[in-house]
Image: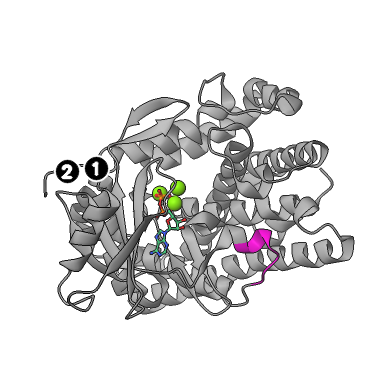
Amino acid sequence: MNAYHPLNEGEAIVIASDLDGFFPSGASLRCREIGDGNLNLVFHIIDDASGKSLIMKQALPYAKVVGESWPLSLDRARIESQKLMLDGKLVPELVPIVHRYDADLALTIMEDLSDHVIMRQGLMNGARYPHFADHISTYMARTLFFTSDLGCNQQEKKLAVGDYINPDLCKITEDLIFDDPYTVSSNNNIEAAIEDAAALLRSDGELQMEVAILRDKFLTKGEALLHGDLHTGSIFVTPDSTKVIDPEFAYYGPIGFDIGAIIANLLLNYVGQEHWSSEESVRAEYRGYLLNTVRDIWNGFQDKFTALWDEHGVDRLASTAPGYRDYYMTTLLRDAAGFAGCKMVRRIVGLAHVADIDGISDDVTRERCQRQALAIGTALIRGHRNISSIEQLIDSVTAPV
Ligand code: ADP
Ligand code: MG
Ligand code: MG
Ligand code: MG
């Protein structure tokens, strides 16, 4: 039973019943596989009598990509569970509790968050999450600060990097985000209506120069332990609560990559609101809410990160050199802007799209939104090294495109 194989629902129930004292003994458990099955299996296991439930996520040894199988190391399940458990120490209220990790089965047993909704869906429904900016800026400030050379013993950090070597998942990002959209690739997924705009990405040398700079940072800048896939599909929300899931792409990389992921996905939803809120006054208000959220996330992140730096900074020179902190925070904002741009572009022309845009049924509206997302994304990429404030970033979203 313990040798690795993809579990079925019956086997998942047997494993869940064995979890020391979680379910009442003799409980009759129900199980349903609720993942999309492309990379991982996700089993939802519930005992109707006690109302107790849990989630078991099992990694598959491949991803199904454009009809082919792309081998993927099962070690990502260890990385995901280890990162969730570390987050459980740094930000316990913002991640699911991990009950158990089984290395043989590449399986993580965790808290069931079914009383939350996936944020992407919530935003498509026009919901507002008044505490989200506070929560996610806390998540990023604490997880990124305490794993960086500013907040972590620098010799220990070097050893910790080895626990998060994640070549297969990093390669997905390196290819799908930082390479394929700018060349002819069978991994791309481009609607015929925007082929002209996609062709421009492949011929624009200045744009590609900026992408190469960002790609190099992703490859080489082991600044802190990232979540690595921090989009609105990796976040469960209610109006009061935020829980970050799915850190299987975790590795030591540039801090701006996590921040940029959140910003990009809020901006993709911003664009898609042309469809999701059809009434113009409602749309304008909701778009205002989304941009305020972007602003609050950056400002909250900056305040909390620098407060942690004041209180827990371990690097003497970084803490005392005049002007260094401003330089550091401005660099993070610029990185975040550039990575946000790359993430917007890849969600329009790359392999994996987002429902905020692809879920738009009307062809003409969807095309207009795709073009607008590309315009905002490329503007962020082009301008990222000159951005000096969050207002400037927001202006580049609302400027006529
Ligand atoms: P993948 O890496 O395959 O994207 P996720 O961790 O994002 O897997 O999970 C896929 C889906 O499974 C989520 O969108 C959510 O619907 C469900 N899911 C995952 N974790 C939980 C959880 N802890 N509680 C409830 N549902 C979950
Ligand atoms: Mg999935
Ligand atoms: Mg996911
Ligand atoms: Mg995932």
Q: Is disc 2's CB within 8 Å of ligand 1?
A: no
> Local crowd at mark 2 within 10 Å, few (<14), some, or many (≥20)?
some
Looking at the rendering, which quadrant does residue 129 occupy? bottom right
Q: Indicate yes or no whether the magenta region holds residue 370.
A: no
Q: Is residue 323 visible?
A: no
Amino acid at dot 2: Tyr
Q: Which residues are magenta?
A: 122-128
Disc 1 and disc 2 in contact, CB within 8 angstroms: yes
What residue is drawn where x is 56% and y is 33%? 350
The C terminus sits in image quarter: top right
Q: Dot 1 corresponds to which residue?
A: 74
The residue lying toward the viewer, choosing from 301 and 127, is 127
Looking at the rendered structure, the secondary structure element under dot 2 is loop
The total number of labels drawn is 2
Image coords of residue 140 (percent x, y): 45, 65
Give the mark nearest the N terminus, 1 or 2.
2
Q: Is residue 92 visible?
A: yes
Q: Dot 2 corresponds to which residue?
A: 4
Looking at the rendering, which quadrant does residue 374 occupy? top right
